[in-house]
Amino acid sequence: MGNISMPDTMSVRAKDVMIVDLSGEAVILNMDNWVYYGLNGLGYRVWNLIQEPKRIDEIKSMILGEYDVDSEVCEQDLLAFICAMANEGLVETK
């Protein structure tokens, strides 16, 4: 997963991205390469949480408060999701 780790990595959605809400799910267009991506409900929730920069541990805490999920599973899935999004140029991490 590269250099993305808990808790100090900050994540924010990239600027050159368009998103369409599909009743709780979403389609994202990366305007740099014109590739579309689909997000399920939870992915879309994370996407909405990173409209402003947030630390990954903050996002994890919010997800744990909203969903019935094991903390370790949440962390692993969240790191994988943020990493995949960063690799596609959809999320910026610091």
Image: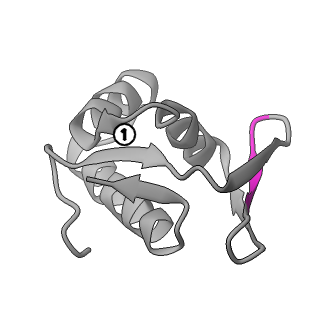
Instruction: Judge by depth and name the residue closer to the eye, 40 or 57.
Output: 57
Is residue 23 rendered to the left or right of residue 70?
right
- Splitting the image into 4 quarters, where does residue 44 fall? top right
- Splitting the image into 4 quarters, where does residue 10 fall? top left
Q: Position of residue 9 (x, y in %)?
A: 21, 49
Q: Residue at x 75, y 36 (%)?
A: 24
Q: Main secondary structure of the magenta part?
A: strand
Q: Amino acid at mark 1?
A: Val
Give the extent of the magenta segment. Answer: 24-29
Q: Residue at x 70, y 77 (%)?
A: 33
Count of numbered tags:
1
Q: How is the image coloured?
A: one colour
| Residue for badge 1 | 69
Q: Residue at x 14, y 44 (%)?
A: 8
Label 1: state its secondary structure.
Answer: loop
In the picture as drawn, the residue positioned furthest to the top comes out as: 65
Residue 58 magenta-drawn? Answer: no
Q: Position of residue 50 (x, y in %)?
A: 47, 37
Is residue 68 placed above or below 90 in the rendered structure? above
Q: Residue at x 36, y 22 (%)?
A: 65
Q: Position of residue 37 (x, y in %)?
A: 71, 66
Dot 1 surroundings within 10 Å: few (below 14), some, or many (20 or more)?
few
- Splitting the image into 4 quarters, where does residue 68 fall? top left
Is residue 75 rendered to the left or right of residue 81?
left
Q: Quadrant of the N terminus?
A: bottom left
Is residue 34 placed above or below 61 in the rendered structure? below
Is residue 18 rendered to the left or right of residue 5?
right
